[in-house]
Amino acid sequence: MSVTGPLFKWFGSKWLSAKKLPAPTYDQIVEPFAGGAGYSLRHAEHQVLICESDPHIYALWCWLISGATEAQIREIPLGVLEGTDIRTLGLSEGQQLLLKSWQRTNNVGNCWTISPWGNKPGQWTANTRARVASEFGAIGHWKVRDNGVLALQEPQEATWFVDPPYQYNYQYRQSPVDYVALAAMVRGQRGQRIVCEAVCPKTGAVPEWLPFVPWGSRITSRRKATNNHHSKELLWVA
């Protein structure tokens, strides 16, 4: 079974970028800052450990990996009226979290309402529901934990895909990252290490906690055809 798209929306997911990133050279993949785990989803057949500190996303991954059924996903309603509180629909926690995650690309916190674009193409539509329901089983062998720093402190030979909150970007309401300590942990790991970062969008400053090199430009938000926001992506591979 293969995965042909993200299982839920999350800002910064590397689903599209992963096509151009180095392929894993180890059967074990570890993502200490998983988010939408776009890189691992591209290689879902591998042994995967994802780590996520956001409580909603952690709970959603736990449900998708070991609690959800195809029938439960197909029960999540379509075309719910804008402004409806998802928690009033009689859904299970996992169903609520999945619907919530398709309403806003970066749906952190406690916003549970159907968004103005939540039913538009690319969001929670009949096609999206059918795809997720038929493909989520591909991750049934994955493992998930809630602390990526602890995972980084446990050396093992693996492909380490490290995509932390970028130093000069939005931090997703998480505790500030100690990038010096993170660099030391990444360097101390065994196996293949792939680390993502980006140039500061306001000042052009380049993060220096690892010797990053430019590798591409990624659209982070779409306004009009002539007014897209781009992220100048950086990469360190060892």
Image (cartoon, rainbow, N blue to C red):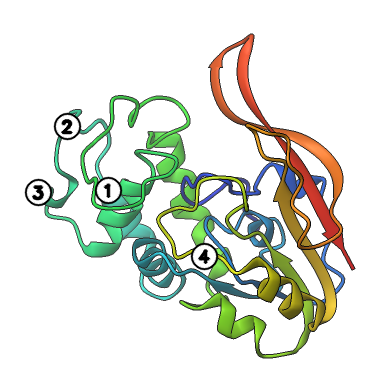
* Residue displayed at 55% across by 48% down: 6
Question: Crowding at label 1, few (<14), some or many (≥20) Cα neighbours within 10 Å?
Answer: some
User: Residue type at mark 2?
Assistant: Gly
| Mark sitting earlier along the chain (4/1) | 1
Answer whether labels 2 and 4 touch (C-beta < 8 Å): no
72 vs 158, nearest the viewer: 158
* Residue 76: image tag: 1
Q: Give the residue number, with chain letter if any, for mark 2.
A: 83
* Residue displayed at 14% across by 36% down: 84
Q: Give the residue number, with chain letter if any, for mark 4.
A: 137
Apparent side of residue 211 relative to residue 139 in the rendered image (left or right): right
User: Residue type at mark 1?
Assistant: Ile
Question: Crowding at label 4, few (<14), some or many (≥20) Cα neighbours within 10 Å?
Answer: some
157 is higher (above) or lower (below) than 1: below
Quadrant assignment, res 94: bottom left
Residue 23 visible in image: yes
Apparent side of residue 9 relative to residue 228 in the rendered image (left or right): left
Question: Crowding at label 3, few (<14), some or many (≥20) Cα neighbours within 10 Å?
Answer: few
* Residue displayed at 42% across by 34% down: 123
| Mark sitting earlier along the chain (1/2) | 1
149 is higher (above) or lower (below) than 88: below
* Residue displayed at 63% across by 47% down: 4
| C-alpha distance separating marks 2 and 4 | 31 Å
Q: Position of residue 117 (x, y in %)?
A: 34, 26
